[in-house]
Structures are given as structure tokens and as C-alpha cells.
Image (cartoon, rainbow, N blue to C red):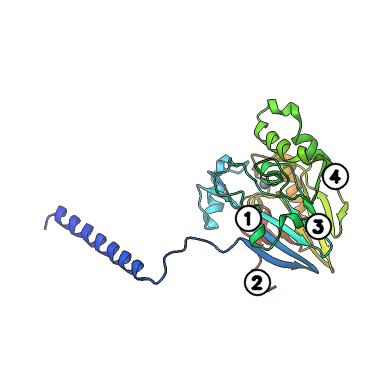
């Protein structure tokens, strides 16, 4: 038998197996569904009912487009050893919702109607409804910082408030920086435009939180500057339980934890962001605080521990009952 004959026989063999699979698939009683469970996850923080609701993922492409400051080869090594693709970074958008019994509070709002990140994100409004939460019932929206993936979901396509009855909370430093008209002439233009479009129409509903202030019952702001000038994280306390919504303290649960001195290209002050990251992660590890990262793998809940020169994220088991 010639090599050519053998090849065509092998080819036929593969085709044979393929059609057998197709036959089996057609014989199943149900077709492939191609859908995922609604993207929300409920848990308790003391007496507070918390829900993480997804806005959908942000595909960031090659790691070098988003992360720098790492020794050569380290990014690939870290991704490989954590069984993650080395050429395609995907960041989740985990939106925290709290029902304190008194107030219904949303932390950050996803990208909204912007298509800059492709068709996958911008799902918050629909995922909230799937989670049984009506946007009209939201009392407070807390914005950790004024980047488009956090404040982008405040208004709809017509510029109307998505949360019509909510007070909006943000740092004055971030509101000033990201709505500054002068920066429309800089490379920050698209980010400034999104912040202006979402925040300025709601200006009369905006209340500023300050570093260390308990500005909503059980919710304390902690300034965590560097990623943006006013970037903040939030300590949530109920019935002696404390939980940290860390927002964008770290954009990647492997890269920026294992090597917290690495940096993210969208940091306003990358050096300050890295110093803040180390300081806050030190605090979370020493206090063994349960935490959540906005961009961590869904739903972003877990703990951090010290590991080598850096830290390590341990996701918490998801419970099927509250
Ligand atoms: Zn972000």
C-alpha cells in the first residue's frame, strides 16, 4: 500500500468516526442548549443578603496589552502553572449587590451600552432581573472608581438613569478627574467621554464618600489609590462578619497576586497602585478577611494568603443553599 493510499484510508477512518458522532448527537433526545445558568450567586455576610451578578466578561487579548513590569517570561510561567491560556486574558465583571434589610445597594455597574469590549459584557441590567432584583428597587449605587467598566452602566442608550431611584456614591477625586473637560483633548478621551455621559446627567444625585467613612449602614470606604486617583474599596460589616469588596485592587487573581509589584496598563499611577495593592493585601491576609475582586474568576469570592514574595488567591466553595 502506498503512503498516499494509507493516508486516504486514515482520512476515511476519521470521517467515519465523525459521522458516527454526528449520528449519536442526532439520536439524543434533546439538542445542545448552548446556554449557561443565569449568572448570579447568592451568599450571606452576617445578616446581609449578598448577590454577585455578572455584567459579562471583558476579553483583553494578549497579556502584554494589559500587564507590564513583570520579569521576562514570568507572565507565561504564571499563567501556564495555573492552567490558564497564555495568549488570551479574560477579566470577569462581578457586580456585588447587598440587601442590608434597610437598603438595596449595587457596587459598580459594568460597561453598560458601550461596545468597546465586544458583545459579551453589558449584561448587568438583564442579569439583575434574572436574579430577582428590580433596578427600580435599588436605593444606592456605589462606584469604586470612574472607569468605563464600573460607571458605564449608570445610564441606558437614551441617557436615562438605569437605577431611577438610587443615590450615587463616588469619591470626589474620581468624579473631578474623569469628567474633566480638558482631558477630552488627551489620550484618555474615550474614558472621559464615558464617565461624562454616565455621571454628569446624574450629578444632583451624587454623594461623595470619604476615606474611612461609614457612608451607608455597615459600608465603610477605604481609599485605595493608584489604579485611579480616587479608587476605593469597601469593608462591609454585619453581625461581627467583615467582608471586603476590593474592586480593582488587583485585576488578575494570579498575575497581580503572585507578583503584586507587576502593573496594569490602565493604572493612572502604576507605582502607587502596586504599593496600595501590597499594603491592602497584607491587611486582608493578616486579618483573614473574606473578599471579592471585581475582575476575579466568577463569582470572585475567596480569601488571600501570603505566598513567596507575593500572595495567593483561594476561591471559596460555592454553596448550593444559603
Ligand atoms: Zn475595572
Q: Gap between marks 2 and 1, in whole Å?
A: 23 Å
Counting residues from the start of the chain, the first of labels 1 and 3 encountered is 1
If you read the primary sequence from the N terminus, does the residue marked by circle 2 or circle 1 appear first?
Answer: 1
Earlier sequence position, callout 3 versus callout 4: 4
Task: Tell me the residue that label 2 is attached to.
Answer: 319
Q: Position of residue 28 (x, y in %)?
A: 38, 71
User: How far apart in space, not on screen, are marks 3 and 4 (Cα)?
Assistant: 16 Å
Q: From the image, tell me which residue sits under label 1.
A: 126
- How far is the residue under mark 1 from the one under mark 4? 28 Å
Query: In the picture provided, is 111 more to the left or to the right than 22?
Result: right
Task: Give the CA distance from mark 2 to mark 4.
Answer: 35 Å
**Which secondary structure, mark 2?**
loop
Dot 3 falls on a residue whose secondary structure is strand
Label 3: how many Cα within 10 Å (few below 14, some 14–19, many 20+)? some
Q: Residue at x 73, y 60 (%)?
A: 291
Label 4: few (<14), some (14–19) or many (≥20) C-alpha neighbours in 10 Å = some
Image quadrant in which the C terminus is located: bottom right
Gap in Å between the C-alphas at discs 1 and 3? Answer: 27 Å
Q: Label 1 neighbourhood size at 10 Å, few (<14), some (14-19), many (20+)?
A: some
Q: Which residue is mark 3?
A: 235
How far across and down, in percent of the image, does residue 286 sit?
A: 78, 61
For discs 2 and 1, the disc positioned in front in the rendered view: 1
Query: Does residue 227 appear to the left or right of 296 in the view shown?
Result: right
* For discs 2 and 3, the disc positioned in front in the rendered view: 2
Question: Sequence order check: which comes first, mark 2 or mark 3?
Answer: 3
Which numbered disc covers residue 270? none
Instruction: Classify 10 Å Cα crowding around label 2: few (below 14), some (14-19), many (20 and above).
Output: few
Q: What residue is rendered at 74% in x and 50% in y?
A: 163
Q: Earlier in the sequence, mark 2 or mark 4?
A: 4
Label 1 secondary element: helix
Residue picked out by circle 4: 208
Amino acid at each position: 500500500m502506498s503512503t498516499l493510499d494509507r493516508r486516504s484510508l486514515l482520512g476515511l477512518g476519521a470521517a467515519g468516526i465523525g459521522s458516527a458522532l454526528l449520528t449519536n448527537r442526532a439520536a439524543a433526545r434533546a439538542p445542545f442548549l448552548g446556554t449557561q445558568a443565569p449568572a448570579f450567586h447568592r451568599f450571606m455576610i452576617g445578616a446581609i443578603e449578598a448577590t454577585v451578578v455578572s455584567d459579562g466578561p471583558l476579553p483583553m487579548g494578549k497579556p502584554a496589552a494589559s500587564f507590564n513590569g513583570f520579569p521576562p517570561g514570568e507572565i507565561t510561567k504564571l499563567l501556564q502553572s495555573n492552567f490558564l491560556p497564555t495568549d488570551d486574558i479574560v477579566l470577569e465583571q462581578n457586580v456585588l449587590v447587598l440587601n442590608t434589610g434597610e437598603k438595596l445597594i449595587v457596587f459598580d455597574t459594568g460597561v453598560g451600552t458601550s461596545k468597546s469590549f465586544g458583545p459579551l459584557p453589558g449584561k448587568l441590567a438583564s442579569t439583575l432581573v434574572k436574579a430577582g432584583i428590580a433596578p427600580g428597587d435599588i436605593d444606592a449605587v456605589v462606584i469604586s472608581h470612574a472607569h468605563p467598566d464600573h460607571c458605564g452602566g449608570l445610564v441606558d442608550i437614551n441617557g436615562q438613569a438605569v437605577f431611577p431611584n438610587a443615590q450615587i456614591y463616588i469619591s470626589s477625586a474620581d468624579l473631578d478627574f474623569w469628567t474633566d473637560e480638558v482631558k477630552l483633548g488627551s489620550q484618555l478621551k474615550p474614558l472621559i467621554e464615558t464617565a461624562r455621559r454616565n455621571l454628569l446627567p446624574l450629578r444632583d444625585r451624587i454623594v461623595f464618600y470619604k476615606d474611612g467613612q461609614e457612608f451607608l449602614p455597615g459600608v465603610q470606604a477605604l481609599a485605595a489609590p493608584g489604579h485611579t486617583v480616587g479608587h476605593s474599596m469597601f469593608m462591609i460589616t454585619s453581625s461581627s462578619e467583615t467582608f471586603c469588596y476590593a474592586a480593582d485592587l488587583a485585576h488578575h487573581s494570579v498575575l497581580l497576586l503572585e507578583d503584586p509589584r507587576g502593573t496594569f496598563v490602565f493604572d493612572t499611577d502604576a507605582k502607587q497602585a502596586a504599593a496600595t495593592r501590597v499594603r491592602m493585601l497584607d491587611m486582608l491576609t493578616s486579618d483573614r478577611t473574606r473578599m471579592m475582586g471585581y475582575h476575579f474568576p466568577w463569582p470572585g469570592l475567596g480569601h488571600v494568603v501570603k505566598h513567596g514574595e507575593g500572595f495567593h488567591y483561594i476561591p471559596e466553595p460555592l454553596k448550593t443553599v444559603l
